[in-house]
Amino acid sequence: MSSSESDTTADTDRQPNTQTAEGTPPLRVEGLQKSFEGIRAVDGASFSVEAGTLTGMIGPNGAGKSTTFDCITGFHTPDGGTVELDGRPITGHAPHEIAQAGLVRTFQIARELEEMTVLENLMLAPQHQLGEGMWRAVLPGSRGRRSVAASERELRETVWETLDRFELSHLADEYAGTLSGGQRKLLELARALLADPDVLLLDEPLAGVNPTLEKRLLERIEDLRADGHTFLLVEHDMDVIMTHCDRVIVMNQGDVLVEGPPETVRTNEQVIEAYLGGDV
Amino acid sequence: LEGGNETGGDRTIKMGMVVAETGSLSSVGVPLRDVGHLPRIQINDADTSTSAEVSVQDSQTDPQQSISAAQSLANSGFPAVVGPLLSEATIQVTNEIYKPRQIVCCTPGSTSPRLTSLDDDDFVYRTISSDAFQGRALAQTASDRVGASSASVVYVNDAYGQALNETFSETFESNGGTIEAQVAVGQQEQSYVSQLEKAMSNDPDALFVVAFPAGGSQLLRDFYSNYSRDTPIVVPDSMRDPELPGNVGEPLTNITGVSSVAAGPGKDFVADLYSEEYDADTPPFYSYMYDASAILMLANAAAGANDGSEIKAQMQPVANPDGEVVSPENFAEGVQMAADGTTVQYRGASSNVDFDENGDMKRVNYAVFVYNEDGSVEDVDTIEYAAD
Amino acid sequence: MTDGTHPSRIEWFTEEVPGGDAALVAAVMGALYVGFTALSLLVGVTLTGLVSGLQGITFFAAVYALAALALNLQWGYAGLFNVGVAGFMAVGVYTMAILTRPVNPDTGVGGFGLPLVVGVLGGIAIAALLGFVAAVPALRVRDDYLAIITVGLGEIVRLTVNSQTFARVDVFGVTTGTGGANGLSLPQNPVDALFYVNPDSPAEGATILGDALFGVASSVGIPNAVALSWAYTLVVVGFVGLFYVYLARLANSPFGRVLKAIREDEMVAEALGKDTNRFKITAFVVGCALMGLTGILWQGSQGFTSPANYLPQQTFYIFIALIIGGAGSNTGSVLGGALFAGLLFRGPPLLANTVEAFADFGRAPTTVIDAVIPLASADPFPLLAFLFDHIAALRFMLVGAVLIYLIQNRPQGLLGHRKETASTVSLARGGTDEQ
Amino acid sequence: MSLLTVEELDAGYGDLQILDDVDLTVDAGEYVTIVGPNGAGKSTAMKSVFGLTDHMGGSVRFDGVDITDDNPEDIIRKGLSYVPQNENVFPSLSVEENLRMGAYILDSVPSSALDAVYDRFPILRERRDQRAGTMSGGQQQMLAMGRALMLEPELLLLDEPSAGLAPDLVDEMFDKIDEINATGTSILMVEQNAKTALRRCDRGYVLAQGQNRYVDEGDALLDDEDVRREFLGG
Amino acid sequence: MIQAAMQRWIGVRGRTTKTAVALGIVLILGLIAADIVRGQLSAGTVGVYLWQGVIIGLVIGLAGVGLTLTYSILGFANFAHGEYLTVGAFGGWVATFVVAGIGTLELSGLLLLGFGSSEVNAGSAGVNVATAPAAIVVGAGFAAVVTMCLALALDRIVYRPMREQDGIALLIASIGVAFILRYALVLVFGTEQAGLTTGSGPDVSLPAVGVSASAHELTLIVAAIALVVGLHLLLQRTKLGIAMRAMADSESLARVTGIPTERVVRDTWLIGAGLTGVSGYLLVLWRGSISFDIGWNILLLVFAAVILGGIGSVYGAIVGGLVIGVASRLSLIWLPAGFVNVTAFLVMILVLIVRPRGIFSGRSST
Ligand SMILES: Nc1ncnc2c1ncn2[C@@H]1O[C@H](COP(=O)(O)OP(=O)(O)OP(=O)(O)O)[C@@H](O)[C@H]1O
Ligand SMILES: Nc1ncnc2c1ncn2[C@@H]1O[C@H](COP(=O)(O)OP(=O)(O)OP(=O)(O)O)[C@@H](O)[C@H]1O
Ligand SMILES: [Mg+2]
Ligand SMILES: [Mg+2]
């Protein structure tokens, strides 16, 4: 109850933070390690993601990509190594702290809030909402419920725009649990974008999304990158990686195999052998 | 709709009962309810111009439900109620219903000393005595008759058990004895062995066991399968139950009990009446139940109206000395006499039933009983207290 | 979830009553009143009896509504399965009693002699504090585990206040305690002070308000006591309104939205930067505080409380009330409280009275075997008499059957089908109306 | 004669109708793909074949026998297997237990079937005792497929089998499906990886808004301008 | 602040838990030893507490085995479990009484276990393991059969129409079932407690533990071990067992995989109910008396044991029961006896704080 008023200074329209301390990459991972019952899922991976880029992450199934995401975002506590966001260490912090610090992720297997409507799912996303404090939500007056209502109205407009863009408007009032597989992925992505973080970690957001829609979503991601957002994208579709990514990180057996611009990665012997298969 | 104020002519005496038909006291509550019906049956079977109506509501052995039960009786115009049994419930119902709604209550089972000082506007009476006396009688029995100079107490952890433990221990110690352990137990535990071990670990001369027959039979089973029957056991009236030896499956010859049971002249008559009517042995407390029910009907007859205040005014006159003696044997005629305006005094199954100014019994008689080898219960002595 | 098999009638009723939710509640209460009055008239109840009976129904309806509302915040919204409701009520009531009981009284254990307001606030605060303590493990375990932890906590509270060890203790030089199994007297209910100059001795006369109330009451032949009970009951009903407004606002806000998200998938909420622990603790603690207050309002009129009031089944009853209404819906909680109190709590005894008034089955056999054998010779009366003799047990079987029927045919409760969107404003495209 | 014949099928969830007069056929040995936008009803169509939706009209026949109202167990006995799109492994069971469950209807699990699956997906042999829920997304996809192959079905229903697989595995997966198809098993598959899928299959269906839109040979659909623009992202 | 501290605390927990638990146990043993040395406590008394704790723990755990099975496989907390136990016990004991007393005692009294009869009671029936072993074996079998039939009937009437609903809905329905069963028993057998056995069989002294055990206690222990090991093997090794766990994971996937889910549900009920009936029967054999609410009275502790052990874990239920049994009895050394159950619940809460998913880390399924 004590901290419920602490969000009064929050500003929902925060601009993406492009000018972090000179040259510090927004996300830096150093020697990350994580094992499960003897399986080394992540084994000393180090990489960094530059501000304002769309960085791809590829690698065979089981290479440790999702586990790396889990360690960065606080869903797993790494066994070793450090994670820095804008130069500040966030290793082992709680997921919500990391999200509040400006780093948000999606889940590979879409996790919808099944008995909430699509609208509610999206309304939830933005951080530091006014009415998330208990007293503000309840008490009348311009510093209370009335201002909450105002910010809710504003948010509502944004949410509807997003719905249109993701072709989900006709489902706005449906429970998220009734969506089709691809629609779930869309909702997952839309929710993360609405949270409006500086850095976005997307775990196969486009798997199962229809190609036509996929194209439009990638355009949207590019727009956001142009606005200064930073993306780390796990994707198995090499066409997407080749045409949209600035840089590519290739993981294999828990470690970074190669890192570099798409063209060089594509032709890298090791990558071809471990990941792409012979005939590319 | 107003409950009629008929004078003479045909009258129906209304009385309610709030008893535990379900819940933890239901094993006593159900047979006691049947006992409570006996006076009604007597009146209605007799060829008089008075008849009686009894309505029963389930207390579920729960104060909250007791309130609901009493309220529903009050709403149906029952001016007098027998019960509830549980002291906690009686206190709560008094505050919530009996006092404000002016209903006379006579309980056969609430033995808490707190009832004596309860602010009840004289609407609450009881035919059973306060545990303040029983605890003393038990302590006296333990030291004098059983000859124990040290004792441990095992008691059920409710108002009844706690009050008896308190008065027993106080008296026993002030008589020079030592209390080795006071062990609270639940009413329905799976096993009492560990608690018994705690009580027995310092080798007390005697064990004082407060329990109800349901949990009590289990407790005694556990005792007999783990300890020698050389240790005498003292029990209060709740453990006077003819079915107990059969249920325990052992002779209870090391048990000495104190019960305020039935020193009234009509007790055997009521027992016979019950067996005849229900084809079963009488439950513990039956005589108090009968008397509570009977005295409310008698006072109602004397009052001539189904009206709480007027019945209250008749409670002491019909119970206390002076007047024609009414007893369970001639109960129906007695009711008719009272209805006709004759001064009566009730002498019941449990005692002579004389109320003091608190609504408690003026004089209480305790029987000291033992269980014989063949399982029968025998009274071997009596102890008498007069209210101070 | 939504199976389309039993939609129509109930939904039509709950959605089409003109006047919205307030009218819906009023309609249900009205129906209960009518039913109760009809049965009462059948058995020949006096006017006083009727008025008092309606008071009883209203009081319990209000108390169960309060408890169900508080539980709805925890379970309906945040998915926190609190099965220790009775324990939190007990803590509220006992704290209030110990704080307000006179120092060294003539009878019973003493207390700190503080004013009633302090007692009530103290009761709420300590219930909240216990809620906080319970919330610590609650942060780490989910649903079933939390359920059993809170059951355990409720039992710990009850066994502790029941124990002779704490019946009488010295705290800061004051002799006080729980009174053990014997229970504890509570202060005079403050509503009486509105009507009597000195509520401890009504003989000293009534206040102006009191004169008015008693005047009206006596003109129709209703005793003062019944009128006073109604007054207290109306205060409790007022609290239902306050709870409702507070909780509805809380639920329909970004705060409530996060709670719902936690109920659905805590990880998602975390990933979106919601400090789920804070929300869970807040919801749980607030719910427990409200339960403490509910306990005080419930026991407050009775002048006395004892551990026997706080058995686990008390919590079950509250759950049943909430389920009838539909978890997740505040209006549903109120309806559920009313229906539980009216139909399951007070209804069956009244029905039994009615049957008793009109039927006589003769003497009941003592065992079921004796009751069934005559059936062979086509004589059903021994069995009927036997069953009527066991009406109390049958009543519980009825409650069980009703519960099963309801959950099979209407699992989402009366109002659980509603999509009550958690937001302060309507979310319709371009909508403007506030919720 | 067609192996699977879906005729004028109407189906949905509760009162909500999703499929509207859908027709599908798969001939013996044929390899058929369904593509279409998200929410078109592709998964619903697959589920309907398996009797998992609320049936509202039309019929499903397998080998000439009506199976519209059969329960899944009987359908499996007739020689169909199905790999759902989401949640398609038993997370708390080990890999091998998952596979064994695939052959539940047999009295005992033939070790040859198990070996065949392990040979097809070596990673599964390596991880036979790992709890399925802790496998990576792609590994789970393979496990689900392996389980469906345990009974060597006549017709295999696959809902987006390549989703989440690495490119080499995508190719491998399609190769494997070809192989399976080559051994005589008919395939009915839903795919978002539409171009590859259409290239490889014999025949394709385009479903949109619960209705048949186009049916043709896979390559023909790939070449169709409208189809490309509307459904294949140009 | 608090949050951060808590987070940190949760972080270090893993490493320190084991040490803390070990330290705690050593501390308690030390305290007991000190009390014994100072002569405040006799070793015999501690022995009795421990032994009783073990027995009660086994009783609770055994009662919980059927519950943990249905809980994890069918996905709901069965609040009527206590009544299944009681019905099984009544059914079994009626069989035992009829076998033991037929011809010598009146049949109606035997059928009602002496309720409402002046002739039939524990003394006159004279049943114990030594005097009537056959009657007891028949009774235990009958207990299983009665409970199985009951479970099947209830599944048919109550739970099957609700297959699509979630765990909470089923839980609520089971509360309704509990009410009906409990008070149906009241209708037939009344509310009193009836003694059933005479004595508890010959005593067997166990010098290793320093206590002597009754034959009934030994029967209980042997049966408990046999049933639990058997069930564990069934779940881990057999096809049915794996299918049950698969069902617990995902019922819909189980269906499309071809697992006949209805049959697995039925088998789960049969096995769970059979175990429950036998454990109810053994419970009564051990206590010696029966009443309509024996199952209800231990239900909360049984739930505590099941959850403590980890839902779905068979051994967990037994271990959970043992923890609760032993801790609550040992509390008698220091605490007033009124706190036995307080201790049981406190220990449960403490264990869950350390191991939030239960000792054997089962899975939550509601
Ligand atoms: N909780 C866990 N317990 C045990 N092993 C795990 C756990 N989580 C992941 N693993 C193992 O760690 C390895 C890495 O898994 P991860 O999910 O990170 O792979 P990935 O690169 O995301 O693969 P994909 O592309 O298939 O999603 C896998 O071998 C997986 O089986
Ligand atoms: N269980 C359900 N209850 C209600 N509606 C559902 C359910 N499952 C799916 N739907 C709805 O049915 C429609 C079709 O869903 P379906 O899963 O068949 O789509 P799909 O073609 O497989 O799409 P995708 O490519 O995204 O997987 C969608 O609009 C979805 O919202
Ligand atoms: Mg992954
Ligand atoms: Mg799909």
Image: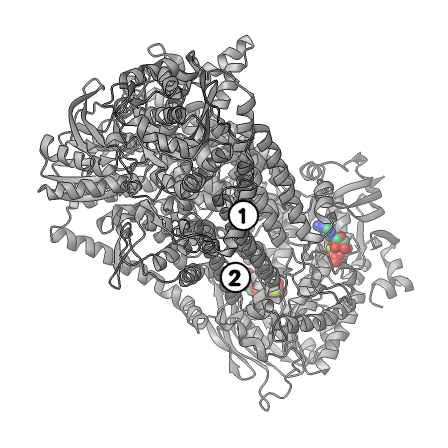
Give the Cα distance between marks 2 and 1: 45 Å
Which of D93/B164 is in front? B164
Residue assigned mark 1: C215
Label 1 sits on a secondary structure element that is: helix
Residues indicated by labels 2 and 1 sit on the same polypeptide chain: yes
Q: Earlier in the sequence, mark 2 or mark 1?
A: 1
Which of A258/C356 is in front? C356
Label 2 sits on a secondary structure element that is: helix
Residue assigned mark 2: C283
Which of B212/B332 is in front? B332
How packed mark 1 is, by other alpha carbons closer than 10 Å (few <14, some 14-19, many 20 or more), is: some
User: Mark 1 vs ligand 2: CB under 8 Å?
Assistant: no
In this rendering, the answer to whether C49 lies above or below D164 is above
How packed mark 2 is, by other alpha carbons closer than 10 Å (few <14, some 14-19, many 20 or more), is: many
Residue A251 seen anywhere in this rendered image of the structure: yes
User: Mark 2 vs ligand 2: CB under 8 Å?
Assistant: no
In this rendering, the answer to whether C420 lies above or below B221 is below
Residue D183 seen anywhere in this rendered image of the structure: no
Tell me residue B204's x, y (percent): 13, 39
Q: Name the mark nearer the viewer: 2 or 1.
A: 1
* Residue at 35% over, 60% down: C99
In this rendering, the answer to whether A85 lies above or below E349 is below
Tell me residue D225's x, y (percent): 91, 64
